Every structure is written in structure tokens, then in C-alpha cells.
Amino acid sequence: MVESLSPVRVRFAPSPTGHLHIGGARTALYNYLIARKTGGQFILRIEDTDRKRYVAGAEEEIIQGLRWLGLEWDEGPDKGGPYAPYRQSQRKEIYQQYAQQLIEEGKAYYCFCSPQRLEAVRQEQLSRKESPRYNGTCRRLEPGEAKARAMAGEPYVIRFKTPQEGTTTVTDLLRGEITVENRVLDDYILVKSDGLALYHLAAAVDDHLMKITHVIRGSEWLPTFPLHGLIHRAFGWQEPVWVHLSVFLKPSGKGKMSKRESAELIKDGYSIFIKDLQGLGYLPEAVVNWIALMGWSYDDHTEFFTMADLIEKFSLERLNPAPAAINFTKFDHFNGLHIRHLPIEELAKRVKPFLVEKGYSVSDETLLKVTPLIQERLHTLDEAPEIAGFFFVEDVQPVPEELLVKDLSVKQSYELAERILAILKELPDMQVSTTEPPMRQLVEETGLKPAQVFGLIRVAVTGQKVSPPLFESMEIIGKNTVIKRMEKAVVLLKQMKEQSPA
């Protein structure tokens, strides 16, 4: 089947019941990509009719997360649009109207069964080893009687009158035709006793009214997919193109990934929640690249994609319904690639908050000099303070023992530090072209290895055993500070020499 490139209307319809996770973000991304590729519209619709599971602040987090990822919508609760409102809790009367239409046409019915009665029926069915489902008591009520009871104020829900014989076939773009025996389907509730519509009815009505052409959503909706097809047919509406995405598996590949695993992941510096990934130093470009390839591929070798690349190359036909294991090692790889792809000014801007959060006083001028030195070394932005914090402090605190040069005594290390300090004091500045030649000459004169001489300078000047390129770092730090730090190292080594046995 060749994919149509006529403009699509698609929607991302999250429930504000918790944090936005990578599964939801991927659903939003695929919807966004096909909308942008075809010149169509991407709609954000908040499906908040489940008031028991509603979490305050979740909608705001979803909106912030999508914007951080660069997934801007054309219509939504914060923007409005021709089919507003875009929160289902504000569309109650619309759903009531369509539910009543189904009742009047004999395609739905009032159900007055109490929760206690339903539970008793359920237990009976389980005891007979049957799958629990509604037994149809109120389905058999005479419509006039049912309406009179409802009008009299008796509590009720509205159920869909599912066909009891034959089969229902629905078509998923990735999986083809899916056929089920109608006798195994339930008479699902469409409207609860509080008058709020359930997802099954609300989503169908909204997708029809908002002229949604493609429903791209998670595979958790496959079990009720036949019902959604039947609801569209009951109204005589054209069904959208249905696309149910692959399941995410745990990194081990064993079992479906769930939100519960996130507490364990965070200990290793990972998370499945978008808000966490931002704080952990991941780039939105890398998140987008990573999740795009968990369920879609362009070919068997291209792996680096910008958003523009994805919009150009994305197609629904190349989606893969097979489960996808979450690979955080691959995620780190993508993050490194995208860090190196950023212009220096942009990377500096993104690194700065992580340095400031750790208490460093960051000069933008210095940061722009430092950023090229750390760009190749960063895997995540939150590594910047550990790698480059020494540029933004007056003094460093080296571990005295780390100043000791491998294969040299304390006395020999002290003497080497004194020689280095004397050379540095004589230099006119700390330009790389000024400092590197005499230090390499010192290596030759002493017969030591570069790692021994440069390692001592590194610990003294940066306070750490691993750092960005040494001489470039010294140039940025400047002569006065380099001399002060080297003098401190000499003092520390002298103290160690005096305390060590002769």
C-alpha cells in the first residue's frame, strides 16, 4: 500500500493521570511527523474524563514536555481552534447528545444494575471459569420502561449494544485485518453514572467532529479496537486509518516496560519520564532521535536524524509492530552525537544551567572558550560541572596523594613540581604555543614520560586526574591562577615530603 501524502489531521490525546513518558512522547512524535510531512494538522486533546485518576499539574507537565521536545501543535486547550474545547471534561453535553442518539436508534441502552449486582454476576462467571462480562439484564428491558426509569432519576450508565452474533473485522495499518467473534465482546459502558463519557464514546465522537483522518495510538487499545470500529459504524461515520504502535519492552527484552520500573532506572541515571530526562542532561533532539527509532526505521544503517530529517523521511508504512526493547546505551550514544552536532554557542547556553545549579559563577566569555574543549567529552549535559567546574572557581582542592607522580618518590614529585613552577613563572603568558614546548622539553630532560609530567600539572591546575586538553585549559585559566594553583601543589607536596620517612 502506498502512503497517501494528502494532508492528514492527527491528534495526541493524553490523559492527565501521571508523568509524560517516552511511550506517550513517541506516540506524539509519530503524529507530529506525519502531520508536518503532509502539511496537515497536529492536535493536542486532553482526555480527562477519568476524574478518579486525574493528577493536578499533569496537563501542564504534558504541555511543557511536548514543547521541550519541539512538538508544537496547531490546535489544543491552550490555543483553541475550530473544534474547541479540546478538553473532554468540557465536552460532556456533546457526548450526552450522541449517547442519546444511540439509545433512540436502539444501539445503546440504559443499565440500572448496581455495582453490588454486577460484582455478584462477575463472581458467578469466574466460578464457572468464564470471562467476566455484562450478562445483559438491562439490555432486555423494554425501551419505554428504561427511559421512564431514567427520567424518574434512577441511577444508570449507558451501555453499547454490541452485536451478539457473527464477527467484527477491523483493520490496523500495521497488522492488517483483525477479526473477533462478537459473542466474546462485552456491552461496554459508554457513559458513567456521573454523566461523563468513557474514552470509547468520547474519543470516537471527538475524532469524528475534529475530522481526524489517522488515529495513531498505543497498542494498549487493541483489545477494545473492535468496539471503536463498531461505534463508528453505529453512527455511520467513516473510520479513520487506525495505527496501533509497538509495545516497549524492558531493557532486558523480557516483559513490557512499565512506569514502576522507573524508580530502579533513576538510580543508574536513566528514566522513562520526559521531565526527568531534561534534568539528567539529555538533549530533546537526542530523545526524539532515540524514540523515533524504537518502532520505525528509514533503512538498515541510518541512525542520526534531526527533526527536519525525520519530517522528510518518516512514513507510516515503515513502522514496525514488533515489540521494541528500550536501549539506554543507544540513548547515551545518540545524546553524544547530538551534543557534538550543536553549534558551540548553543551548547554553551544549554550547559550553563547545569554549572549554575552546582553553584559555579559562570562567565559567558569563559564558557564559550571552555565549551569546544568539553564538547567531545560530554555524554550528558549534567557531566559538565564534573568535567569543567575547575574553570569557574578561584581555587581547586587536589587530593594530595594524586599529586604524587607514578614511579617517583614524594621527594622526586616535589622536586618535579618545583621545576614546573619555576618554568611557568618565567613564561610571558599561558598560550598553548608558549607553555607546551618547554613542558615537552622538560619531559626530554628528565627522561620521564609525558603522562608523568603532564599528570602532575593536570592535578595541580584542575584538581582532577582527568580533564579537557591540558594546555588549552591552562590558556583559559590564565597565568596568575595557574601559578597560584601550582604553588599550592608545591606546598602540599612539601608537607607530604616533610611528613614522610627519609
Image: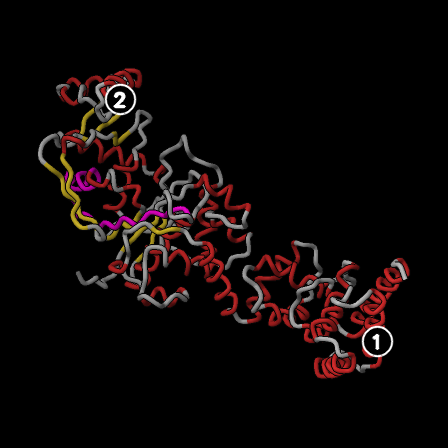
Task: Residue 305: name its quadrant.
Answer: bottom left
Q: Given the image, on which type of amino acid does mark 2 rest?
A: Tyr
Task: Residue 444: name its quadrant.
Answer: bottom right
Identity of the residue drawn at 48% across and 37% down: 56
Identity of the residue drawn at 31% across and 63% down: 314
For the C terminus, give its image quadrant.
bottom right
Q: Is residue 129 above or below residue 326?
A: above
Assess disc 1: are there few (<14), some (14-19) or many (≥20) residues with their C-alpha within 10 Å of its C-alpha. Answer: few
- Residue in front for this viewpoint, 449 or 494: 449
Q: Is residue 319 left or right of residue 375?
A: left
For the N terminus, give its image quadrant.
bottom left
Please give the label number shown on residue 156. 2
- Residue in front for this viewpoint, 71 or 124: 124
Look at the numbered disc 2 and give the secondary structure of its residue. Answer: loop
Question: Which span of residues is magenta-colored?
Answer: 227-250
Please give the label number shown on residue 55. none
Look at the numbered disc 1 and give the secondary structure of its residue. Answer: helix
Q: Looking at the image, which residue sits at the far left?
A: 166
Q: Is residue 237 magenta?
A: yes
- Residue in front for this viewpoint, 273 or 235: 273
Mark closest to the chain's N terminus, 2 or 1: 2
**Could one spot residue 151 in this view of the protein?**
no
Q: Is residue 87 left or right of residue 167?
A: right
Identify the residue under disc 1. Answer: 419
Question: Residue 296: x and y, percent?
Answer: 32, 58
**Could one spot residue 312 in this view of the protein?**
yes
Colouring convention used in this rendered image of the protein = secondary structure
Of tags 2 and 1, the one toward the viewer is: 1
Q: Given the image, on which type of amino acid does mark 1 rest?
A: Arg
Q: Is residue 64 left or right of residue 128?
A: right
Q: Is residue 169 above or below residue 292?
A: above
Q: Is residue 348 above or below residue 256?
A: below
